[in-house]
Structure formats: C-alpha cells, structure tokens
Image (spheres, helix red, strand yellow):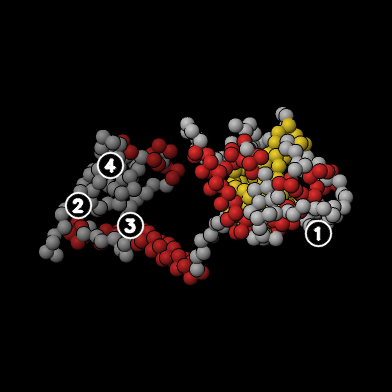
Amino acid sequence: MPPIIDLDEAIPNLGQPGERIRDRSAKKAGQPDLTLDGGASINPEVLRNLRDSTLGLKIEDRDAYFRILKLASLMSFGEMQDLAIEYRKARIAAHDSKAATDRKFSPFVDLFLNPDAYRGKPVVLRGTLRKLIRYEPGPNEEGITAVYEGWLYAADSQNNPTVVIFTEKPEGMPLGGDLVEEVVIAGYFFKMYGYEAQDQPRKAPMILAGQIEWIAPIPKQSLHIPVWVYGIAGLVALWIVVGAWTFRADKRRLPDGIRVPRTMLTHIDPGQFHPASLGAIDIPPPSALSSHDELSRSVTPPGLPTAGVIQQVPTTKSASPALATRSEVDQSKTADGFPDNPQFPPEDESV
C-alpha cells in the first residue's frame, strides 16, 4: 500500500523547466512512432528509457515528455476519458479474476502498485486539486509554450498526491497553492515522479494531459427581494407604530370633566362661599400666634361636610368656630394615620 501523506505537508514544486529538463533539440531521425493504436496507448519503445521514482525529471525523459504532452493536447477531454474508461474495465476484470481477493478495486491504488501495467496507458481520476501553477516549458520541438502543473488528491489515494501536467486550463479556474477545487483528469500515465517531502523522498504518479474537467462550485445565490416589498414592509411598520401610539394616547386621555353627584349639592350652601361670608372669618394676625399655633390651625371653611372630619370647636384666639387645633385633627385619624374620607350619601338615581 502507498504511504500516507499528511495533507498539511508542503506540496513540492516541480521547479522551472530549466531545472528539470535541460534544453536540447529533439531527435527526429529514427524516432519511433508515438502510438500504434490510434492513441489508445503510447508506443512502449518511446518509453523504454524512463525510470520511476527519480527525483525530478531527467534528460532522458525530455523527448517522450513533450511528444506525449503534444498528443494529449490534440485530443478532447471526452476522447481521452473514453479511452481511460476502457482500460480501467480491463484492469477491473484482471483484479476480479485474482483468487482470494477481498479488496474493492481502487484506481489509484492499482496505479500506484502497478506502474509498469499503466505506463503509456490512459488514466482517469477524480479528486481535489490542492495546487495549480502555470509556467513556460522553454523551447521545444512540439511548440508547447505554456503548461499547468497541478497536485491532485483522489478520494481513494489515502492522502497521496497525483501530479498532473496539462496544456489547457478551464476558463475561470483559479491558480494558487491553497486550492480546494474538484476536478476530473484524463491523460497518459508517464512515470512515478520522485519529490522531496518534509520527512523523506516520496513518489507520486505523473499524468500528462491536454484538458481537465473542472467541477466548479455552485455559487451561493443571494436572496433578491424586490423594492416594493421593502415599501410594503415600511408601511406595515408605520401602521403598527401609529396604532400603538393611538392606543396608548386613548388610555392616557383624561375625562372631559369630573362628575359631581347631585345629592352632594343638598349638603352645601352656596351662600357659605359668598365673598361677604368669607370676610366674617376672624384670622388673628401672625404676630399673635406662636409657630406651634400656626401649624395646629384647621383650614377647613365652616359649613363643609364634616363626616369623617374633626368637630369644630371655638378657640381662645379667634371668634371663628371653623378653626380647630392640630391635636384634634390627629384624634380623627384612622389607624393608618390618615383622616377618613368624607362619607357622601348615595346618588339618587331618580334625579
């Protein structure tokens, strides 16, 4: 089984083309045919000098690298994917025919464990692209001016990456070193590519492709609310505020007038409030009263109902029978310390 790589581990960079493959003219004389079956596979003679698990690409890899990349760029994604699916069916049949097998077929694991069986064969993988960069490969006989390098993590790869080199990026697909993009790749398996990891050298399958399929995330649709909805909401809110204010105003409104029971008039002599009668009250001058006497005088005019009120008694300092001492008021207080309210006769409903 392939070793498990921590996702937090730094993803290696293949480096600039000059660091990986020294430029030299591709040989044409005596060059073998690239494919013998119309693109279903790469001619093994083209691949005979490749060595797996070398750190980086070697000079011996150059010719086959650019020739295969050019062939893949001339094929559509659908064509390459169909060829890869056909070859996978053959691998599944071979896997199922093995005796005492209890493992479910895994495309990545089968590729990782059997690189010789896949070399030059079309492969299709689906997974998450974590890193994608673009660079110029330098002068080459195939006329390739730009390539993309991506690091893919398939669902069944146990966190082991796959390196994919392709020539055409889907429109709108982002570049960067911290991506989470769902893609499907279809291309030719080239070799097991060796790279320096944080702990030790590791290897990853290298796929050469022309196009890849980007499964773009579905954008979040913002809720569009028509302008007229805001208008209606504002009117409703205004109606609620006005209604609440009106209701509170009605509760606070005072009565137009205080209703006086008519039977009360039979106990009050309007003449008692005539200005002439008010002048008859003899109020001693302030100098004749002590401070205690000023506070002990009753201010109840004569003739008002006296139910629950102190009985008026004459005083030595005034001829008015309406003045009472403070001690007499205290004697008429209730247990709570307040005078009893005047007791009015019940209202005569017939009046």
Q: Is residue 1 left or right of residue 292?
A: right
Q: Callout 2: helix, strand or loop?
A: loop
* Type of amino acid under label 4: Pro
Say whether marks 3 and 2 touch (CB < 8 Å): no
Q: Callout 4: helix, strand or loop?
A: loop
Between label 3 and label 4, give the one nearer the viewer.
Answer: 4
Q: In this orientation, which residue lies closer to the viewer: 248 or 21?
A: 21
| Of pointers 2 and 1, the one earlier in the residue sequence | 1
Residue 338 appears at what percent x and percent y?
A: 30, 40
Q: Which residue is mark 3?
A: 278
The residue furthest right is: 24
Residue 192 appears at what percent x and percent y?
A: 70, 39
> Which residue is at a point 42% across and 38% down the rendered structure image?
290
The alpha-carbon separation of the residues under discs 4 and 1 comes to: 115 Å
Say whether marks 2 and 4 touch (CB < 8 Å): no
**Mark 1 nearby-residue class (10 Å; few <14, some 14–19, many ≥20):** few
The alpha-carbon separation of the residues under discs 3 and 2 comes to: 25 Å
Q: In this orientation, which residue lies closer to the viewer: 339 or 109?
A: 109
Image quadrant holding the N terminus, namely top right
Q: Which residue is mark 4?
A: 339
* Type of amino acid under label 2: Phe
* Type of amino acid under label 1: Gly
Q: Which residue is mark 1?
A: 143
**Mark 2 nearby-residue class (10 Å; few <14, some 14–19, many ≥20):** few
> Which residue is at a point 30% across and 42% down the rendered structure image?
324
Q: Is residue 208 visible?
A: no
> Which residue is at a point 42% across and 65% down the rendered structure image?
236
Residue 70 appears at what percent x and percent y?
A: 74, 56
